[in-house]
Image: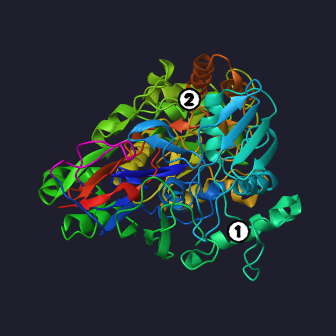
Amino acid sequence: MKKTSRRRSAAIIGTTAAAAMLLAACGSSSTTNSTSGSGTSSTATKVKGGTAYFAEGPGASPNYIFPLTPSTNFSVDNLAQFQILMYRPLYFFGVGNKAEINPSLSVANPPVYSNNNKTVTITLKKYKWSDGETLTSRDVIFWMNLLKANKTAWAAYVPGAFPDNVVSYSAPNASTVVFQLNKSYSPTWFTYNELSQITPLPMAWDRTSLSQPAPNPTAPNLPDTTTAGAQSVYKFLNAQAGDLSTYATSPIWSVVDGPWKLSSFTTAGKAVFVPNPSYSGPVKPSLSQFVELPFTQASAEFNVLRAGNGAITYGYLPVTDLSQKSYVESIGYKVEPWIDFGFNYWVDNYNNPTYGPLFQQLYFRQALQHLVDQPAWISSFLKGYGVPSYSPVPLAPANPFADAKSKTNLYPYSVSAAKNLLTSHGWKMVNGVMTCESPGTGANQCGKGVTKGLALNLNLQYASGNTSVTQEMDAYQSAAKQAGINISLSSASFNTVITNAAPCKPTQASCKWEMENWAGGWEYSPDNYPSGGELFGTGSGSNFGSYSSAEADKLIAATHTSSNPQAALNAYQDFMAEQLPVIYQPSPDYAISLISNKLGGVTQNPYLNLTPETWYFTK
């Protein structure tokens, strides 16, 4: 199975397990090495070359190549399993299966903090772009210029945080970048959640049309040096990123610094990568080709894999097909659950003109949460391959962040509890549907903005292609009906669901959506520390439901600056566990991966970053 998330990704487990996944070759590994975290048996012979085929999650193919990504495309399939192969971030995260920074695979050396943690100095390693240019501090400045001028178009933007908290940035020489911050910040938080979001961009992209020649990177007054110019450059690059048919042929996207470059790409999402001979990183690709294969349904992927002809070397097992685990092992695959550092939820639209005021009522969110039977869903639908989500801080993989409240189900499954919350707040059953009979703001009334006669007829759209997700939503619909909530279900592709879930204003025509479930929730990356500003800060780029709370904003801010970071994180996660900014649902393992016994060097990164450059075939 496999899932996808934000870095929205959908879990492939239910479908197969998750919706966004890696494409690999075949594999066998038992020892470890310092770079990839896994190796092969000492008796295996490494073979140079070969093509590895990696199965993408159902309906979750890559569809955006520009690293400065908007919220509608901010997904694992785009960032962790597509862009990162070609364009390396300043800092790479994940060492084996550990959720930590990876100095070896980072483009820069560890940052140095000074001036009471208000000055950050970064020294770049010696990397080159595939067009022959050296990666320099100017490439980081280019990213910063584009980001500053177009921050509201960036999914990771949090008002007041990066880049607003950077007073100035400079490049004193070709290998050094210096940031001056507006106040003292926790070095761990700033590195894990702010510097982690930077991807140096080649100066070959600093133009506003394809008819212009690639600019001289040392020329003065390039377009990005003014706000208007940086906006024009972003507009051009964003438009180019929207033309999927040109990804493999574009003179823009062909300039890479990562270990791979595109050889071909289809609008359906099939991506063929070949090694970048100019790659400067520590591990050069051994494979001669790496292919990501699109699938609309998990069942289609599994049918191809179990045919046993090697058409997929790194796939996934749908939960519904767990009975065939022994069979796939017999035809040369090993089964390895892939657990990501994230949590799962669906979003309510707080700005929906009709139901937004109702979603803003805590009692109603509590009623909705009481209808999610997490233990039963994990047992029955995920077959044990998942963990509950009770707050935004993940319970798995094992980590030092989740406190006691995040490990406790504050709103256990109870139709009667959900029903009592409604009837005690002015709702009455009318023809089987709860209807607001007592509008107003009193303790026993429907709440501010909720109109008399409003009936609980809600729409919930979820990502298609995943059997377990369909089962969960059917169970939820049934439980809700018993409580007097009529939920109309619909399904669409993962990409459609996350596009529909975009933050909006009540006056916008696009703001009519009510609940959206892309079935993978959130995976922490490039904001690798689970402090939540990008998700739940007022006005944040990935605050899909437009949740807003002054207290939440205060608690989030404290996680950035507190001298007692764990206490600050505990206060934040406890508030979010109680307040239910979203509806929490079980977090399936990202995937029940099926990896060919002939593929070595495979690591299942907790941030879901794909690293096929460490893979190799064996014999």
Going by the numbered disc 2, the residue's amino acid type is: Gln
Relative height, residue 36 to residue 278 (above, below): above
Determine the secondary structure under disc 1: helix
Left or right placement of residue 374 versus residue 547 in this view:
left
Residue under label 2: 366
- Residue 205 image label: 1
Q: Main secondary structure of the magenta part?
A: loop
The outermost residue toward the bottom is 211
Report the residue at 61% width, 27% height from top.
579
Left or right placement of residue 571 versus residue 120 in this view:
left
Q: Quadrant of the C terminus?
A: bottom left
Given residues 203 and 273, the one toward you in this image is 203
Please state the horizontal and vertical placement of residue 542, each as a whole percent of the image. 65, 46
Can the viewer see residue 431? no
Does 15 lie within the magenta span? no
Please state the horizontal and vertical placement of residue 279, each as a whole percent of the image. 50, 62
Picture quarter containing residue 215? bottom right
- Residue 220 image label: none
Q: Which residues are magenta?
A: 28-43
